[in-house]
Amino acid sequence: MAHPVVRSGFPPPLLLGSLEIGRFIAASMVLLSHFMLDVAHHARSPDIHILGGVLPPAPIAVQYFFVLSGFVMMSAHHRDFGRPIKALHFWWRRAARIYPLYWLALLVPCIFLYHSMTPHWLVQLVFLFPIRVIDLVPPAWSLRYEIVFYLIFGFGLLPYVGKPVLAVWVLGLIWGCWYYLPWGLSHLLPLPVFPHAWADSLPGQAFDPHAFYFFAGLGGGWIFARFRLPPWLCWGLLAAGMMALVAQLPHIFWGYGYGHPFMQAGTGLAFAAMMLGLGGFERYGRLRFGPWARRLGAVSYPLYILHPPLLLLTWRFAGDFRLGQAGLYGMLLLGLSGLYGAAWLAAFGLDQPLQRALRRWGPVRPAIRGNARI
């Protein structure tokens, strides 16, 4: 019997295990890309490598995070448009999610570099202002983009002005990328000219091509929240997304780069299609994940944001070893055990209890829908 595309009469599941597992894999790729470089530093000679000297492609993991951010926001908040109190609730939850563990991660490098800190730089670091600065916690550059997404999406929830704000954002981003169209088409409209001072500030980041990932996630989240896709369409979206992603890999340097803006849009759409397909299978019960998937998802953000200061502490106090290949693999396994263990303790000993407490202090306490964590 055919399954027509119908509007969903129920909200998305409380938790999508496929997104949680994807979140954990992406955070692990970023961790490995950094930690394996540190391990390689302890090689006895330059010709000794682990895993053939190949590093996991961290950029494609960040692209997944940006698409996931949009998917989660729209699927969790698609009913909140036009309700001002929901914008306040959204901003509170996002700030409570990002800042506490980030501040903990920031504390470590600040202890070592306090003598070179200026008040102006410190304020920029602490509050993650959406400007380009030298970050002491390397993954923080992606959080600055997330802050921009949160700010504008929150305004998008406001009545009357919300949807026009989102429309202007989309049109401005496309116009800003007009240069990348084939010659001739790009001359149909003049290129936008922004003040030079905007390049490294909020306007510059708002219209950066990284926003294409976010918009792709928003579209996928809206479709998932509003429609119950039939299984055959879920299969088609999953297959199409996987094939599109594979086809684009040479153009994004096999996951080590981002490509030109319209390639970024294609990568975002590929990830969004895959999320839609996997989410549909979970909705129909054809994919089932136990509580372990949720635990992996809970560990992901602590793993992502806390591993740089942990590596800094290790680098500072562990000494300088000269190891052969067996020793390097031993260091890799021992270090990963410690990093994952520390992230697990931070997630369930600090982050999760703190999240529950902060949600109680927020402006409103609505029911949670979808994968509300980012």
Image (cartoon, grey):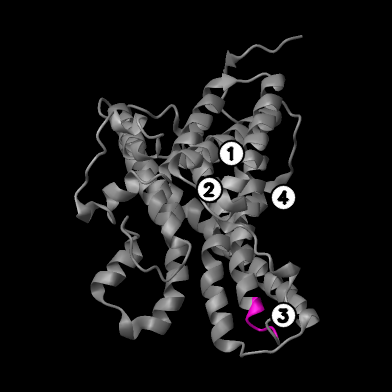
**Residue 367 shows in the view:** no
Select label 4 or label 2 by which is in front.
2
Which residue type carries mark 2?
Gln
The quadrant of the picture occupied by the N terminus is top right
Left or right: 8 with respect to 80? right
The majority secondary structure of the magenta stretch comes to loop
**Residue 292 tag number:** 4
**Residue 63 tag number:** 2
Left or right: 34 with respect to 80? right
Question: 155 or 254, which is in the foreground?
Answer: 254
Find disc 1 in the rendering and name its residue: 271
Please give the name of the residue rendered at 71% of the width and 74% of the height, measured from the top-left corner.
Answer: 332
State the SS at label 4: helix
Select label 2 or label 3 by which is in front.
3
Comes first in the chain, label 2 or label 1:
2
Which residue type carries mark 1?
Phe
Which segment is the magenta one?
A: 39-43
Which residue type carries mark 4?
Trp
